[in-house]
Image: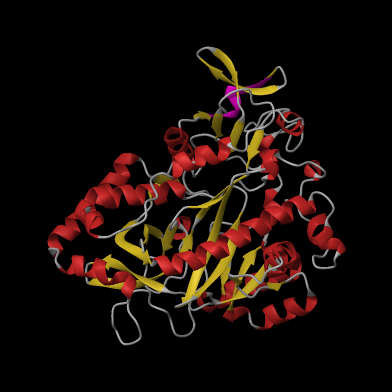
Amino acid sequence: MNGATSEIFDEMLDEHGQVRPAYRGYLSWLDEQDESWLRKQGAKAESVFRRTGITFNVYGEAAGEERLIPFDMIPRIITATEWRKLSRGIEQRVQALNAFLHDVYHRQEIVRAGILPEYLLRDNDAFLQQMIGFSPPGGVYTHIVGIDLVRTGPDEFMVLEDNARTPSGVSYMLENRETMMAMFPELFSRMAVRPVQNYPRRLARSLSACAPAATKDRPILAVLTPGIYNSAYFEHAFLADQMGAELVEASDLRIVEGRIAMRTTRGFQPIDVLYRRVDDEFLDPLTFNPDSLLGVPGIMDIYRSGGITIANAPGTGVADDKAIYSFMPDIVRFYTGEQPILKNVPTWRCSEPDALAHVLDHLDELVVKEVHGSGGYGMLIGPAASKKELARFTKKLRAKPENYIAQPTLSLSTVPIYTKAGLAPRHVDLRPFVLVSPNGIDITPGGLTRVALRKGSLVVNSSQGGGTKDSWVLED
């Protein structure tokens, strides 16, 4: 997550200390509340999260160790006007991502046009040869997309990255809202906030619309999880339950009469749509990693023969590669014929000699990320790095420059959090969740706001000490 180096946009207060329109109604309510009661409600929220099991595992720590994701009870508020502009930009970007994926696995017109260098596909582990020439059911590659956004000014939202493989965090968005409604029911009767609770039903409807030709009746949905030790297992179980879908592991599945079927009390039942939360590499040991115990042997053959829909489609990871990200403005223009509504963060591709020289010369000013990195791991925040860290990253960049991109540190917006001393500003990002089907693009109003809870912290990822808060989109 990038930091701030110049004037910071405060989403609640303007430059004169006046409350912005989005927060006026909420702050009016907040001023009426007893402070000791508010503190009790904050503690109550933590106990609700712990009781519900809203925790996550942190890779690299002691086996079985789980952490509670910190929740801040001050909502992040977005006006209807702001959301309309954001929605247009998100829809445009997701359309371009799906068109890009179809193109790179078919005619590769964007390469032929000289816009995207061919080596970015050829040397990319996320580009799957097995998907070349194949079109998934309904022509949808990214059934669920998470677009990470940062705000740098009143009308300035930028895309930090695209999550086109298996975006996580939607369960926290839903639980944050449910917790807020349980703690402050009168607040929601006083303020018109757009609902998010129907996301699981919309997800089930969107996935069902992508069912393969082999589907005979109402589509059967299942969620494939790596198991209880996965960091996002809570979310896998939560979504399966909320959608009315089965939660399955590899051991529950087998091929029966040319279909992927799951074990039930009435024998094996074919699955039409598999929402997989297993990475490509582990999806099919006959096609990818032969040592995988998390996937289903032969599922890629069933998929290519039209026997099942896999969401998201294998090979979508090439669209959220951070080197590909740097071409997204060109990708949007190429496939939509329009100028991008949402800007990219300026990005240097370290695989290019001139860009690498610039990055090395300005390493203490930049944020450096692994091309395939996620979760805040494997990155350098130059302004906060020690001389030793800078030296270590210099060696990494010189050894494998193609593994990295670099970006400037941005002046990210802040929103208030609740502290013992009162409200205090902290940096945030926003991950709206987008559903794609042949019936259209469905964007949930708001999304997951991740917040850097420590003063001066620049990282919002839960694995790196960040927290979450409810995201409100106000009605007109």
Residue farthest to the top? 266
Q: State the image coordinates of residue 364 (x, y, percent, origin top left).
A: 58, 80
Q: State the image coordinates of residue 340 (x, y, percent, origin top left).
A: 63, 70
The quarter of the rendered structure image containing the C terminus is bottom left
Residue farthest to the right? 112
Toward which corner of the image does residue 418 lie, by quadrant? bottom left
Between 313 and 396, the residue placed more toward the observer is 313
> Is residue 335 depicted above or below 198 in this figure?
below
Judge from the rendering whether residue 250 lies leftward or rightward of residue 77; answer left or right.
right
**Residue at 59% across, 16% down:** 268
Between 35 and 215, the residue placed more toward the observer is 215
- Can residue 465 be seen here? no
Q: State the image coordinates of residue 243 (x, y, percent, origin top left).
A: 46, 35
Magenta-span inclusion, residue 220: no
Magenta stretch: give its range: 248-255
Residue farthest to the bottom? 16
Judge from the rendering whether residue 187 lies leftward or rightward of residue 381; answer left or right.
left
Between 27 and 405, the residue placed more toward the observer is 27
- Can residue 309 be seen here? yes
Magenta-span inclusion, residue 249: yes
**Residue at 79% across, 76% down:** 353
Toward which corner of the image does residue 437 lie, by quadrant? top right
> Is residue 452 depicted above or below 293 in this figure?
below
Between 12 and 82, the residue placed more toward the observer is 82
